[in-house]
Each structure stands twice: as C-alpha cells, then as structure tokens.
Amino acid sequence: DSDDELDGFGYKEPSDNLILPCEEPMQEEERNDNTEEGNTKQERMRLIKEGKAKMVEEKKRQREVCLVKHFTNQCLPCCLIESTEYKRVLLTSQENKLMKEAIKAQKAEQKKYAKEKDEWESGKHALRSIVAEIDSTIIETGSVGGTLLTRFAEKGLKYRVQVNPIRGSILWKMEVPQIGQDPASVSEVPYILFVLQAEEFCDLINSGSFWDHVHLVQDRYPTFTVCFVTNKLMNYINKCERAQYRNAPNFNSWKRPPVEEVLCKLATHHVKVHSRQCADEAEVADHIVGLTSSLANCRFR
C-alpha cells in the first residue's frame, strides 16, 4: 500500500520529504546571499576602521594647528602642517613673539621716559636739579663756610665750590639730566647773592666803593636779583663803638659807617637789590639753604 492518498480527481498528494527539482538552485542562491552579506559586513568594518584612523589623524592635525595658533594667533590651513613647513612657521611665530615683546618693552621704556620728563618739567624733582655755585672765598675766609656746607649736606642739596666771576658770590643753576632721547640741559637762575663779613661790608662803605660794587654786579648781571647778606654786622659795629669809647686814643682811625643810610638807599633807589642782616653763621647758612629751596620751586609756580 502506498502512503500517498488520491484526491477527488485521482491525483496523489506529494509527500513532505519529496525534493523538488527547483529547490537546489534556491538554496544555492541563499548561500550566495549570505556570503555577500558577510562580505558587506567586513567591508563596513574596514570602512569604520579607516574612518577611525582618519579621525585620529585629523585630531593630531588639529592639535598641531592649535599649537601653531598659540604662537601665531592666526588661523593656518592644514596644508601648512607639514614637517618642514611647520618648523618654519613655528620659528617665524617665535620671532614674531620676540619682536612683539621687544616692541612692548620699548613702549614701556618710552612711557617711563615720558613720565620722568613730566616729573622734571612739573618741578617734582626741583630740589634735585638745583645746584649752588659757591665762590671759594666764602669757604676759605670767614667762619660761614663750614656751617653752610653742613646745612647743604643735611638738606640733600647739591653745591659746587669754585671761583666765580665776582668774589664772594653765590650763583645757582638748574641741571636736568638726559631723559631718553632728550639731552641734558642747564639753565641759569637769575639770582646772585653776596656773603659779606661785617668788617668787609663796613670797609666798602667807608671807602666809598660799595656803590661801585653794586653797579659792577648790575652791569654784569642786568636781569638778576642781587642780595647782600651780612654776618654779625650790628654786633661788629657795637663792639667797635664800645672799644672806641673805652680806648679812645687807640681807635681814632675807626669811623662808624652809615650802614642804616646805605641799606635804606638799597631798598628805595635800586630795583631788584636786597639786603639781609644775620646775627650769626647759623642764620646765614639757614637763609642761603632756604633761598636755594625757594629758587628751585619758584621756577615751576
């Protein structure tokens, strides 16, 4: 007996184990599809690996670009990031950096010079710029010299002991040092002072040469203010008068000079001529030092 059964028309139903003639090509095609799918997957994996490698390379290039940007502060195309070109660009960027630093230092130096120049021109360093030129006879004769130089040193003021055109005088100058490209400069202070011991002053008056001395000074320094400082004048006159009174026969040659009349005439008949009577050497020194400070500062008022 057969396992196949006949249908209503007398045909047999094929069994499940029956292999049809077209089934083998279909299985082959399915195997080919699986092979192609595997190849496609491998190709995809290869492309992914290549993409990752390109990403790594691109990140490396980007780091190099950032390094160059750090030195150049500008964007550079990736084609410049080659070995020799990169070194050249890096070297150039370092040179530019050094140049920028040099320009910055130069500007800072110019700013410093400008500030220092403004300070000198505004009178901030006036006491550092004034110099008193003291005639050597003031230091060598009399008792004023030592005290005077001590006062100058205590106040930090500059002075020079030299031979002045007129004996017994003190002149002043303003000296500004070189600042940057500006050369050093020296200017005269239109003021002249004479330190006269009491005996010397009285001798000039009694001999009638005091006014000649005044005219000589005014002719030589027509725009200057003139000041005569006397030391212990009235003390000297009083001492001589007392000695003359006590020992009249020995003092017949001494005559009291008209100092009050001369000093009054200086104030009323002569423009820019002054006098100052000091009681001792300390007062003389303090007057000259104070006058030096005033002359330095008044130039900028």
Image (cartoon, helix red, strand yellow):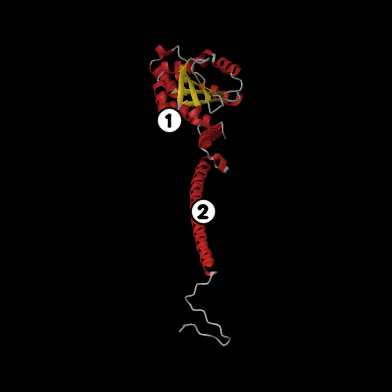
Percent position (x, y) of residue 169?
50, 19
| Residue sitting farthest toward the front | 1
* Mark number, residue 85: none
Q: Which residue is mark 1?
A: 155
Compared to 25, does 190 lie above or below?
Answer: above
Count of numbered circles in the view: 2
**Counting residues from the N terminus, which is met first, the one under dot 1 or under dot 2?**
2
Percent position (x, y) of residue 264?
56, 25
| Quarter of the image where one finds residue 301 | top right
Q: Which residue is mark 2?
A: 47
Amino acid carrying label 2: it is: Leu
Percent position (x, y) of residue 161?
45, 18
Percent position (x, y) of residue 147?
40, 24
Amino acid carrying label 1: it is: Lys
Q: Quadrant of the N terminus?
A: bottom left
Residue at x 54% of width, y 65% of height: 25
